[in-house]
Image (cartoon, rainbow, N blue to C red):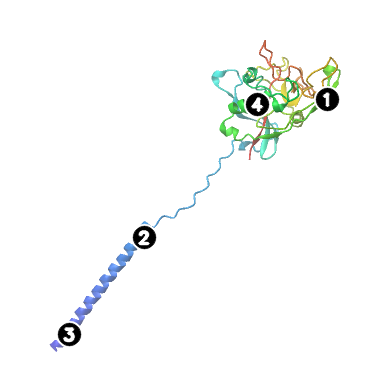
Amino acid sequence: MKKKILALLLAVATASMFAGCGKDDGGRERESREESSYEQEESAPESVSEPEEPEEAPLLTSVYASAKPGNEFQFGAYEQDNNLSDGAEPIEWVVLANEGDRILVLSKYVLVGEPEEMSEGEIRDDAIPGADRDSVTWEVCSERKWLNSIFYEEAFSDEERNCILQSELTTPDTEGTWSGRSNQPFHTYGGSDTTDYLFLLSYEEFKEYVKPLKIANAEPTAASAVKANKETGYASWQLRSPGVVQDWVDDMTMTSTGYSDEFAEIGSDESGDIYGELNSFHSGRVYNNPSTGVNFGGLRMAMWLKVE
């Protein structure tokens, strides 16, 4: 009997021992698995999301995308009040046309007469092969060089220049009669096509854009040294279209070179109305009177701006 009781106690003790070991091993195994899982979580690299494309900054001129012909706004800066101590003044522009992704604008005022770089001969006209040295077209003129170098750099910031488009320009020939010479007919060459940031309007562009808006009259700025009409305060301003032919053989006969020594000019009479026909004068480019420093005619520059 005693032997049976001892055997039973031994069996129970043995079972308890194995049961305890099983529990302990399982606990350590679970702990080991948990630690291993934690280490994997710690060491696993974080998922890297694709970098977002940076949003492209809107154009400075995007606010003018809905501008209509005749609207005015400020863009760039240039000396206008002839007071250097207060810095350059914002340039005011008039919208001539809106083509959806670009607008054509014209300076509201006659901003400059003959720039210093031109008056001192730093920027000169190029010679036209086979023509007189005084002949000129938009392609070779000093005004074009100055507008697309000195003025382009000085009047606009980097951000503003990014909005100015290069424009493919054609300057048509000019045909007509000059009343100053008994209505003699003339035909002058417009010259080769050009690519420019800033430009003067052609006579055709003037008729298409400026005349309908009735903004041909323009005042000169105080810094421009351009002579204004005493009655109206308006000044003449230049086009890139050629004026009358270069020379006269005698008082009644024109030369046949076909090149002009001056650009066409837009002016106003005492009533403030623009002249009805294309006008051109021998003093009518931007050349000034050496004795007074006053220019007979100045520049209203134009450009295309992207607004998309």
Image vertical order of residue 28 relative to residue 299, above or below: below
What residue is disc 2 on?
40
Picture residue at 32% right of the left edge, 62% below the top: 35
Task: Tell me how far mark 3 sits from mark 4, CA to CA.
Answer: 119 Å
Identify which amino acid the numbered label 2 is placed on.
Gln
Identify which amino acid the numbered label 1 is placed on.
Gly
Image vertical order of residue 267 relative to residue 197, above or below: above
The quadrant of the image that shows the C terminus is top right
Q: Which of marks 2 and 1 is nearer the N terminus?
A: 2
SS of the residue under disc 2: helix
Picture residue at 85% right of the left edge, 20% below the top: 184
Task: Tell me how far mark 4 sits from mark 1, CA to CA.
Answer: 28 Å
What residue is disc 3 on?
7
Hey, which residue is sitting farthest top in the picture?
Answer: 291
Residue count near mark 4 (Cα–Cα under 10 Å), binned few <14, some 14–19, many ≥20: many
Task: Tell me how far mark 2 sits from mark 1, CA to CA.
Answer: 90 Å
Hey, which residue is sitting farthest left in the picture?
Answer: 2
Picture residue at 35% right of the left edge, 62% below the top: 37
Identify which amino acid the numbered label 3 is placed on.
Ala
